[in-house]
Image (spheres, grey):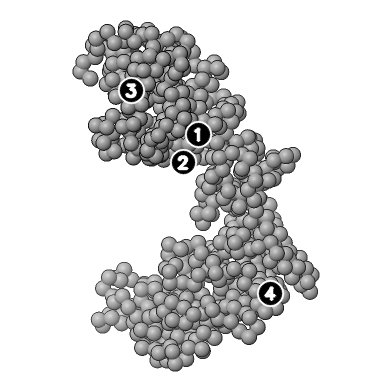
Amino acid sequence: MIPRFDVGDIVLCYRRGWQQRVVDGLWPIDVIKDLPKGPAEAYGVPRYQCIDHYPSQDDDYYIMKRPDSFRLAVGDSVVFDLNKAELNSSNRSRLPHTWIKGTVVSVDITGIEYYAAYECAFKNNRKEYSCHVVKDDDKHIAKSDANPRTRLFDSIEQACGREHLIYLVDTFNIDVTTFRNLVISKALQHTNFHALSWLQCDCNNDVMDIKDVSGNNLLHMIASTSHAVRFIREVGIISFDKGKHDAENELNMFDLFNLTSLNNNGKSWLQILVRREDVKAFDAARSPIYELAWYLYSKVLFKDEHLCLLEESIKRVKSRESRVVMQFIFDSFMSFRGLLQQYRTLAFLTCKSQHDLLQEEFMSGFQGEDASHHAAVLARFYLDWRGYKRQVISSPFIGLASRGFDIFSHFYKANPQIILHETYCVLPDEDQNEYIQPELAISSKKCSTYEHIDVNVVLACIIGEEGSGSGFRTCDHNFYLHSLLKHTVSCDPKECPSWLSHMKELITRRVEMLPRSQDCFKHKIRILGDSANLEGRLKVLDLLLQGQPHVRLNALEMLRHRRCGMLRFMANMGMLMLDSNASSNRLFVKHTSELRFLKESRIPPGTSTRSFLCFAAVEYDDLQSLEWLCQAGGVPINTCDGWNLLHYSAFLGRMEIISFLHTQRARKNLTNEVCCRKPY
């Protein structure tokens, strides 16, 4: 959070064009206090008062340092990269895409849409042109008679990129091996990350293993220079923009910034920054504003004992002002580190129980009297950093609802908006053509696939977290089908009341079967039974419905995702009247076009909700819900647009449901009735 510029610095501010200004003050409180209420990212708060202008962000798009001096003067003969210049003409396509020779005609150009260090004139095919060179470094412009070796050293000093260094060496055939130590010394002196990467990856110089007699490694040496802040900020940018950089041909930042690497005096590179009282560099390494802190939050890089040594070093800083600021930066980083770890623990949640979750590092605060406070702090952290540099992307709190964890209520009460207005990615339990007949199972592999879907918190709570991506289609269905047929024909309903209980007994008795067959049984057992976290999810769902009385649950959604427990919840709460007329339910009518058992997308008059849902359970292959629906009044024997439940089950190939119907009293009625539904 330490501003890049100090009071009195001459800067360039963008305000309908770049204008020269002087920094009159820092943190203009009168402007900040009038900012809109609500969450505001720290990087959007004005840091400077520049006469009558207050840049909203501290980066080169809004405010930048005005050059103290210029390398070139009007009339100098120069070469510049035309690809990087702003051409004062629309005929760029006719010009060469390369370096070109010209003359400086103006210096320090402001008042235009962009800032330019020089305006240059040049000729091409006897026509005269002019262009603006936006930056005063060797990557953009150089004297036409400059010595190539001098240009190489200038480029390193000016923090030019690796591509430009390669260009100079290749174009002018510079043999770097003849002055290798000078180049390394220059790169270290001016802390040019790109030059060090170039030396490491293109010149076969292992700068990562550099050490002096005091045991200082590369980062210790950089921390000892006055340019350390430039290096740290540059690395922070690169750590976020990996897609724009060749990670394989750059320094390994994980090894580079390892705090556990100490010199002969037992000091880390951060302790050197503290000893030098380089507040800006220390802030760049620790403040999330400057990005490196997001990369360095890992406990692998920071062990507790080394963090204690760092804090002790801060306490020994002589200047009270520097000591106070550095302690604040350190405390802020530790708080940020804990919150980021909490966010990532929830965002990549793998714990199957709340007890296991609370045993994770940094998560113990979400139990006891302070749980609500910790939840409110993490909720604010999410709001403040949401969307920043792709680090805080999605809400981590809906995952708690999908697992039925009690601590979800703390986040929901802290700020419902961060939950109600977000979506969550789940793997649904919809039927995926899970045929067990071998002739159908083969072709089903070419049909639908297991895909994640984005849902709101209510649907996430209904579906849960178990999902059906279990590799069911790779199972050996032969043994499963044989066992089902044997159960249907041989088992006594009094001793073996359901296919679910039969499967559980097979697994319990460890009947000899192939591992692939076991996978098939375990998947079906999970589908046909209530999940272990159902009770917790029902509590969360009840909490959500109390806060959103306008939400209407749809029983068809429960069947689609094969969630009988949620269907029972609706009935128990009076949201589902099974004896009512199905055509009076607007949600049913709204989705009739999606149901294949209906003819002309119309619910037949007189069809009860129970009967309608039984047919829907067959369509969605939800045997558990069908069994529950048939418990009170038995299996419906009425037809729906020409077919009964057995007809429709046979039409869809629902073998488990056919087995269930075979054990019911209505079996004869269903079997003897002729299907009148034609065409199918």
Mark closer to the chain start, 4 or 1: 4
Q: Nearer the viewer, mark 4 or mark 2?
A: 4
- Quarter-of-image position of residue 616: top left
Mark closer to the chain start, 3 or 4: 4
Q: What residue did someone put label 1 on?
A: 464
Q: Position of residue 94 (x, y in %)?
A: 26, 73
Left or right: where 660 falls relative to 464: left
Q: Nearer the viewer, mark 3 or mark 4?
A: 3
How packed mark 4 is, by other alpha carbons closer than 10 Å (few <14, some 14-19, many 20 or more), is many
Rounded to the nearest whole Å, what is the CA distance between mark 3 and mark 4? Answer: 73 Å
Mark closer to the chain start, 1 or 3: 1
Q: What residue did someone put label 3 on?
A: 485
Instruction: Give amino acid for label 2.
Output: Cys
Any mark on residue 267, and which?
Answer: 4
Mark closer to the chain start, 4 or 2: 4
Secondary structure at badge 4 equals loop
Q: Position of residue 144 (x, y in %)?
A: 39, 88
Q: Position of residue 133 (x, y in %)?
A: 43, 76
